[in-house]
Amino acid sequence: MANAEHSGRPADLGATAGGPAGDRLRAIRLGLWLVAALLAVRQFAAVLGTPRGERLTDLETWVGPHGVLHVGGPLYDSTRFTGTPFTGLVLKPLTRAAEQALGWGWTFGSLLLVVALGLVAARALPQPAGRRTALLAAPVAVSLLMLSLPVRNALWLGQTSIIPVLLVLLGCFGVRGQRAGGALVGVAAALQPTVLLFVPLLWFTDRRRAARATGAVFAGCTALAWALMPGDSSAYWVHHLAGVGLGAAADDLANQSLHGALLRLGLSGPAEIALFALAGAAVAVLGLRRAVRYARDGQLLLAVAVTGCAAVVVSPTAWQHQLLWVLLAVVGRVGRRASDRLVWPVAVVLVMSLPARMMLPNMAVLYPLRDNLVLLAAVAAAVAVPFLPRTSPHFDRPVPAEYAPAVPARLRGVPLLPFLRRVLTRPNLLLELLLIRVTYAVYSRIRLAATGGSNEAGRARAERHGHQILDLERALGLDIEHAVNHWVVGIGRLREFFDFYYTSFHFVVPLTVLGLLYWRRPVDYRWARSSLGFTTLLALAGFWLYPLAPPRLMPTLGIIDTVHGVQDFSKPDYGTLTALTNQYAAMPSLHFGWSLWCGVAIAVIAPSVWTKALGLLHPLFTVSAIVATGNHWVLDAVGGALVVGGGFGLTYLLQGPRARTLTAAVAVGEARGAGAAPVGPVVTPRTGPAGAAEAVPDGCGAGVPGADGAGTGGRDADPRPPAPDRTPG
């Protein structure tokens, strides 16, 4: 299964290009390697900076009373050691290493293994690979591995789970000769028995010598461990049924196997075992069939990843540090359109790098999905995701997106990022929802962390800032919070209206605006989404730098909290950073900021005057609600307006003016993106030097000077779609 046997010579990772393009590639490659090095240093410091007893806990299972490792007693007495007896035999030479030296050496050695794994995976990409892929694949792969939860978990626990994956890749791609490759896979199987699923993959891809060598080496290593450690071998293979029952409980969330998922769903006993056996067998058969097909197609790394994902599913216990196979599936290509090509790799990277609670909302109905998210990704990769074969015309040349002509900017040097061209077609909905959810989860975490230090220090600092804001408002004659709050409290219907408006419209209106723009105005959706993202980013900086107590949390002002009710200021933790939200994230007000963003977007895009006016009523009602309910100062709304202006300004600075496109252009662009023949010329209005709109044929801007937004100038455009570089995923 070596690349050289099926796809020509391996990619030359040292290949370079001449001229400015080559210099840029080398600079990018150096920057990516620097990022990978920084991530490695961070992981090293995180492990060794953790107090003893909380790090390398699985490795320290063997720590004896004299500070050295020992394997004198049974391995599985405590059930904390989950490796095979052969793993214990391999680790036995470490019994004389001092504990502290072992911690440093083990962590550093594990990081080196991660780097080796990334290099081998990069060289295993289907050939021939483009120069850009050859230069950038290795540092990108190493960085993704460093960020992945399996690697971080393995480093923190002191586990050996990186070694079997590396051995399999070396056996398939790194050595010549079937017997040598099969021997490496056999050693990997002796360390992790589910690797035996690679034997049929080798057999059915005409690597029968390698398959026999794998079985023989596995049997030899297991027999050697049985001869030297008979008690432990009997406990592992007989009493614990190849490791079942070792480690945490099988229904623990860390066990992302099908067996663990069935137990979490409430099944048990013979019914659960029968269902697990049937479903596991089906996944193994279907996964292996797909893996054989991809291997014969020349996508050998994808075949290995699919087989590894099937092994994760059918294993009785697949702990978090054993799930690296799922990350390798990122190399599969899915989708005919260029706009769909990123969905699968982004989803895999996010699933394998972020906690599941950041991927899905905290809703009880979604718990079965959230608790088994990695398992679902493994099942999808093994049996469901329609990876493109190399024979597909869309493998290297996905259907390109249609671009709107660039609108000339008033400022020289704008846009700063001319390659961010305005796409006419809608972005992939699944990818948008995924990124919105993850972005909001990150926003919530940063907002939660912006407390200004300890709880007591954070509260004192926030209240001090509150007095500063109040003094400034008094100097400006804007201190109306107390008067408005008490006036609204005296009018029951008005109080109920503002309470409802404050609690209900903060998310509903922005999501509605985004949804309508996505459906009806895709180009404007991208523009509005970018400005909203920059607005929120600037607001996070404000929360972090200037924690501010809202009026309702200033105990001496007498402000009535109409939304949360009467508060008890005698409680020592009142008003501090809670487990749900940062009570001191008042400056700037994103309640008003998001509402103003909605108003501006509607006023700019809406076709009728009454719709524009209706959109501008939303920020007016919102600023009234945040002041009346005691949740914000008037100057908080001013801060919200500033970050909204900054968000739109950054969007203009980086991407240039908003692209003005007709609905017909969008419709034809989508038809082209779907492969349909164009029904006529695409007419896209374009602002000329005098500010008047002029019709420009062809929604791609082909042949129009400066129309592609990427500095093509007046060069003639090639009517054929450009051949994209072959990058992983």
Image: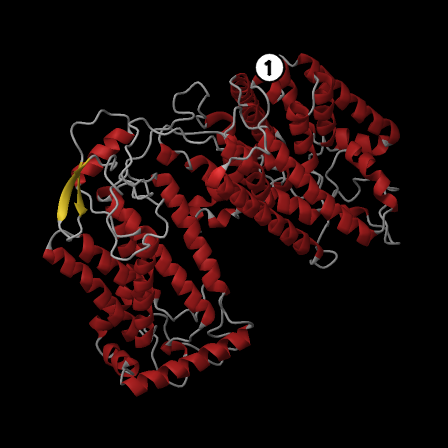
Q: Quadrant of residue 318?
A: top right
Q: Quadrant of residue 180?
A: top right
What residue is shown at x 39% (from left), y 41% (from top)? 431
Is 480 left or right of 262, judged from the image as shown?
left
> Percent from the top left, x then y, of residue 472?
34, 84
> Percent from the top left, x then y, of residue 613?
14, 61
Residue farthest to the front, as pictured:
19
What residue is shown at x 28% (from left), y 32% (from top)? 716
Is 130 left or right of 467, judged from the image as shown?
right
Kind of residue sitting beneath label 1: Thr
Q: Quadrant of residue 705?
A: top left
Q: Is residue 719 above or below residue 593?
A: above
Render colour scheme: secondary structure
Q: Which residue is mark 1?
A: 205
Which corner quadrant holds the N terminus?
Answer: top right
> Percent from the top left, x then y, of residue 305?
57, 29
> Percent from the top left, x then y, of residue 643?
34, 65
Out of 300 and 16, give the one closest to the viewer: 16
SS for dot 1: loop
What residue is shown at x 88% (from left), y 42% (from top)? 72
Query: Looking at the image, can residue 85 be seen?
Result: yes
Query: Looking at the image, can residue 317 be seen?
Result: no
